[in-house]
Image: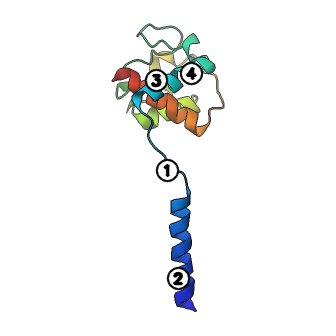
Amino acid sequence: MIKINCLLIVLFLFLLGCSGESKRKPDKAEVLKKGAELYAKYGCAVCHSLEGKEIYGPPLNEIYMKKLKVIRNGKELEVIADRKYLKKSITNPRYEKVLEYQNKEMPISNFSEEEAEMLVEYIIALQE
């Protein structure tokens, strides 16, 4: 009985793993297209330049892997703008603020998980 239950569990886990859609990584052209659509849809260009100009918020070109001074919980920290940082900044912009922009507010948007991931990929792709 135990042997049959174990086999059923293994079979179930195997089928579960095989039944889901495989997540393929989009190519650069797809990232640039979808990222630009999201960038426009959410009005990111109102505050963030992709050409290095300061508008209201920090420019997003060449931000990936850059050292930034941020304020988090009233303390100044130095962070690296890696994937995790970029996604957190998009999905929870009030968690910490870039020091030079600490008195400015980024609106909170309801990005889906996929949209936030795509915007991160877009910011990175623009730099490559």
Q: Position of residue 7 (x, y in %)?
A: 52, 81
* Residue closest to the eye, 75 or 95: 95
Specify which label sits upstream in the sequence, 2 or 1: 2
Could you tell me the amino acid type at mark 2? Cys
Vertical order, 121 against 40 (above or below)? below
- Outermost residue toward the bottom in this view: 1
Give the CA distance from mark 1 to mark 4.
24 Å
* Residue closest to the eye, 82 or 128: 128
Q: Residue at x 41, y 32 (%)?
A: 27
Quadrant where the N terminus is found in the figure: bottom right
According to the picture, the residue beneath numbered tag 1 turns out to be 22
According to the picture, the residue beneath numbered tag 3 turns out to be 32
According to the picture, the residue beneath numbered tag 4 turns out to be 37
Q: Position of residue 22 (x, y in %)?
A: 49, 50
Give the CA distance from mark 2 to mark 3.
46 Å
Label 4 sits on a secondary structure element that is helix
Instruction: Report if the CB atoms under discs 2 and 4 are less than 8 Å apart.
Output: no
Quadrant where the C terminus is found in the figure: top left
Label 3 sits on a secondary structure element that is helix
Task: Give the colour scheme of this rendering.
Answer: rainbow
According to the picture, the residue beneath numbered tag 2 turns out to be 6
* Residue closest to the eye, 34 or 83: 34
- Marks 1 and 4: which is nearer the front? 1
Give the CA distance from mark 3 to mark 1.
21 Å
CA neighbours of label 3 inside 10 A, class few (<14), some (14 to 19), many (20+): many
- Marks 2 and 1: which is nearer the front? 1
CA neighbours of label 4 inside 10 A, class few (<14), some (14 to 19), many (20+): few
Give the CA distance from mark 4 to mark 3.
9 Å
